[in-house]
Amino acid sequence: MIAVLLLLAEAWWIPCPAAVAGVLFTACLRIGAAVTRRTESREAARQWGELGRAHPSPHPTVPGTSWPSASAPGRWPSP
């Protein structure tokens, strides 16, 4: 796009605002993507960290549960 503007413009300063606008727009997109990636990485780390913890039950009379291990006794029925 800038190359086309440079070919069509007689003076070099005419396409400069378009180039600056493109640079600023690209910088804003990159900063937004970096912030989103950081936020999602933190959320994923928090969720992975909670996998092994006991979660409170939504019902007050049922005790909290946790993810049982596949090798836990009584996990699989005996043949």
Image: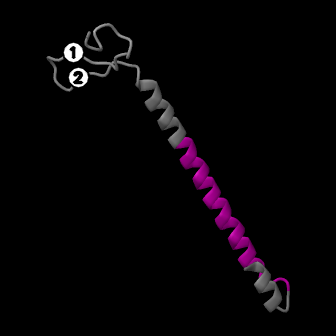
On the question of residue 14 being in view, the answer is no
Report the residue marked by disc 1.
63
Q: Residues within 10 Å of mark 1 (few under 14, many from 20)?
A: few
Kind of residue at badge 2: Ser
Q: Which residue is the site of mark 2?
A: 57
Residue 46 vs 53, above or below: the answer is below
Circle number at residue 20: none
Image coordinates of residue 44 in percent, x first then y, are 48, 36
Residue 34 locus on image (x, y percent)? 61, 49
Q: Residue furthest left?
A: 61
Q: Residue at x 61, y 60 (%)?
A: 29
What is the magenta range?
A: 12-39
Q: What is the residue that sits farthest to the front in this orientation?
A: 79
Distance between the alpha carbons at the discs numbered 1 and 2: 6 Å
Q: Secondary structure at mark 1?
A: loop
* Residue depicted at 16% across the width and 24% down the height: 59
Badge 1 vs badge 2, beta-carbon distance below 8 Å: yes
Which mark sits nearer the N-terminus, 1 or 2? 2
Instruction: Using the image, determine if residue 35 lies above or below residue 61.
Output: below
For the residue carrying disc 2, how many other residues have a C-alpha within 10 Å: few (<14), some (14-19), or many (20+)? few
Residue sitting farthest toward the top: 73
Above or below for 73 versus 11: above
Residue 27 among magenta residues:
yes
**Residue 30 in view in this figure:** yes
Is residue 53 found left or right of 3 in the rendered image?
Answer: left
Q: Determine which quarter of the picture holds residue 26.
A: bottom right
- Pinpoint residue 52: horizontal percent, then vertical percent: 41, 20
